Image: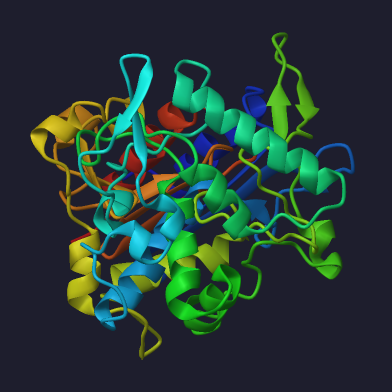
Amino acid sequence: MYDFKTTMDKLVQEEVRAGRVRGASALVLHRGREIYYGAFGKADAEREIPMERDTIIRLYSMTKPVTAAAVMLLAERGELDLWDRVSRYLPCFRGQKVWRGGEEVPAGRENTVYDLLNMTSGITYPDEAHEPGRRMKEMVDMHVRRRRAGERVCTQDFIRGIASVPLCFQPGERWMYGFSADVLGGIIEAVSGMTFGEFLKKEIFEPLEMEDTGFFVPKGKQERLAQYYDMRGDGSFVPHTDSHLGEYFGEDNAFESGGAGLVSTLDDYSRFASMMTHGGVYKGRHILGRRTVEFMGQNRLSDKQRVSLDWDSTRGYGYGCLMRVLTDQGTAGTTASHGEFGWDGWTGNYVTMNPHEDLIILYFVQQCGADVLPAVRRLRMAVYGALED
């Protein structure tokens, strides 16, 4: 049998050696036991800081599974209903319009919490390809300018801005990636009476001992925050300085983005993933109910909605509760078992959670717009090939 550690080291290290990323790390847990950890390259090349186990990285869209868990926690407590209209908690979403045929028309119905969880709301991200996307970009750019000018721009400011942009399609019509998770963060604030960050800290981060996870990096920990990079056309790297979706990680941050705002470490995120793969339980503490986690790990898209779930990274997957869910091994090109779920982030971070195998795979890099799919497929095949019954 091949040497699993050597194989994994080679796969992770090759991405750095080939110049595709500055630094990379990976962690694999099986049945609660660590079977692999490796880190290579630089977390910050300019300061010569290596990628380490406790390196803090920007999760970007790997924030979304945490947001979904927080919503489902409130749902299982009876504090919200998945079929509640969004406007029940955020009145600014009442009477939304849909962009159709070059004009705004009334929405056929209001969006629900369930629409947001499944990204079938019609709420877009900034996108120059269509009018709602262009308006969303203008809204984000305006709030970023306000924040840089010294104004306090909070989560609810962004929520109102999102609500002001027409939907790309009628609620429930199809799947589309967008600011749905950020709206869920605003709903959590309305239901709980806390800021989104306060709620996550009390209900998820503290019970899971996630000490390095939050919506900003304290001054005492900033030396551990990885630099993130853009790649130029000639293959060289340059530190990223823009705000992609309005996110900001300073101590004075007031926008707590449910779709892209968290920072974390390998070990911190593995604790969240462990809770998800163990029926909502971590070290004997019940964070979520078993049936709640089972609900989260299922495809919730109809065949019609699923047609637009057409990214390379989602081939063979369905979608539900802000996560991909494996439904077809062959199409996905993986030996993972059906029901494996997870998500990834704009800077190349990746998590997969498999309750059936009691398996967690985490892969962290910090390159903007990184295409880590080929590397991740190889890593996953190596991991599943090494598992024992």
Q: Is residue 204 left or right of residue 276?
A: right
The number of numbered badges drawn on the structure is: 0
Q: Residue furthest right?
A: 47
**At 34% from the left edge and 76% from the top edge, which residue is drawn?**
74
**At 34% from the left edge and 65% from the top edge, which residue is drawn?**
88
**Residue 311's spot in the image, x, y percent?**
33, 26
**Residue 46 in view here:** yes
In depth, the one of 282 and 88 nearer the eye is: 88
Q: Is residue 4 left or right of residue 197?
A: left
Quarter the N terminus occupies: top left
Q: Residue furthest left?
A: 303
- Give above or below for 83 relative to 126: below
Residue 381 image-quadrant placement = top left
Q: Residue furthest top?
A: 234
**Residue 279's spot in the image, x, y percent?**
25, 75
In depth, the one of 353 and 7 nearer the eye is: 353
Q: Is residue 152 left or right of residue 270?
A: right
- Give above or below for 239 relative to 90: above
Q: Residue furthest bottom?
A: 284
Quarter the C terminus occupies: bottom left
**Residue 312's spot in the image, x, y percent?**
33, 25
Q: Tell me, what colour scheme is on the image? A: rainbow
**Residue 32 in view here:** no
**At 46% from the left edge and 79% from the top edge, which residue is drawn?**
192
Residue 139 image-quadrant placement = top right
**At 18% from the left edge and 33% from the top edge, which residue is drawn?**
306
**Residue 308's spot in the image, x, y percent?**
25, 27
